Image: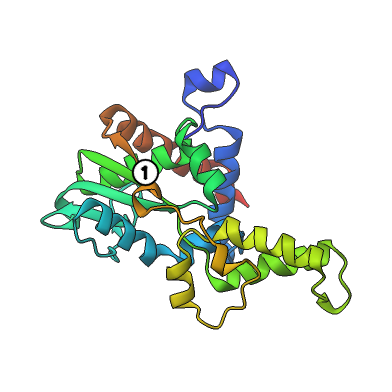
Amino acid sequence: MTEPKAAKDKESGNLSEGARTHVVDVWTSWKYKRNEDVYSKYIEKGNQLEEDAITLVSLQSNVFHKKNERTLENNWICGTPDLFIGQSIEQAEFIEDTKCSWDVFTFNRTKHKKLNDLYYWQMQGYMMLTGAKEARLRYCLLNATDDLIRDELRKLGYAMRLVDFEETKEYIDRAAKVERNMIYDLAAFRKRYPNFDLHLNVAEWKFDIEPENRLFTIVIPRNESDIELIKIKVKKAWEYIKTVLDKN
């Protein structure tokens, strides 16, 4: 959805360079039946803790939510909103999408930053698919999983060049800080992972963050002009495929 830099391209409604690159990637994936494997610890946390995020939203909003599994599509786009409020997903009054922050720093930064453009257009797309009047982005701060913490501890060991991961005092102190940065409800973490060998001092723990302070919401109203712009951009993408890529 990014506008091109050149004035003549803007006036002509052409796709930006980044949009053309994305179209090439989508076309390549379709033509050659291959997908790029995109991995990051941030995506992994969101995937692993999706149900936990939905539970946090349900408890804090006093509305029972169940993960939507239905993918919707129209002539322009397809998508799978996380949550909805209404009689059905096709007739949703509101749609909601959960985002799991990596840690308390990214969680709080997001509160004070401009809304991510990608998320804005994602929500407009969901409202286009459902007819919803409003979208709610639910940012959640949740305990990391035991696997994610182990990954970070391994990285720490490699960075410190430990021999056979010998747990020196310096390592234990730094590992405890890693765990503190990834756990926000210690009792819940220990209940879920009773066999996880923590480096932090459980007896002196006083760093829990209350559930109500681990969720915040950004409300995005439906914008009909931007929804029409999505249609225009998709049509331009199809034109680009037909005039450029189909020749290959």
Q: How many marks?
A: 1
What's the amino acid at mark 1?
Answer: Phe
Q: Nearer the viewer, residue 68 or 156?
A: 156
Q: Nearer the viewer, residue 87 or 155?
A: 155
State whether residue 246 is above or below residue 55: above
Kindly give the residue lying farthest to the left in the view shown. 87
Horizontal relation, residue 237 to residue 180: left or right: left
Q: Nearer the viewer, residue 234 or 178?
A: 178
Horizontal relation, residue 60 to residue 144: left or right: left
Is disc 1 placed on a helix, strand or loop? strand
Callout 1 crowding tier (Cα within 10 Å): few <14, some 14–19, many ≥20: some
- Residue with the mark numbered 1: 216
State whether residue 53 is above or below residue 109: below
Instruction: Kindly tell me whether residue 229 is visible in this rendering.
Output: yes
| Quarter residue 174 falls in | bottom right
- Which residue is drawn at the image coordinates 40% and 63% (left, top)? 50
The picture places residue 38, in percent across and down from the top left corner, at: 60, 60
- Which residue is drawn at the image coordinates 47% and 41% (left, top)? 118
The picture places residue 6, in percent across and down from the top left corner, at: 60, 20
Q: Nearer the viewer, residue 244 or 51?
A: 51
The picture places residue 212, in percent across and down from the top left corner, at: 34, 49
State whether residue 198 is above or below residue 41: below
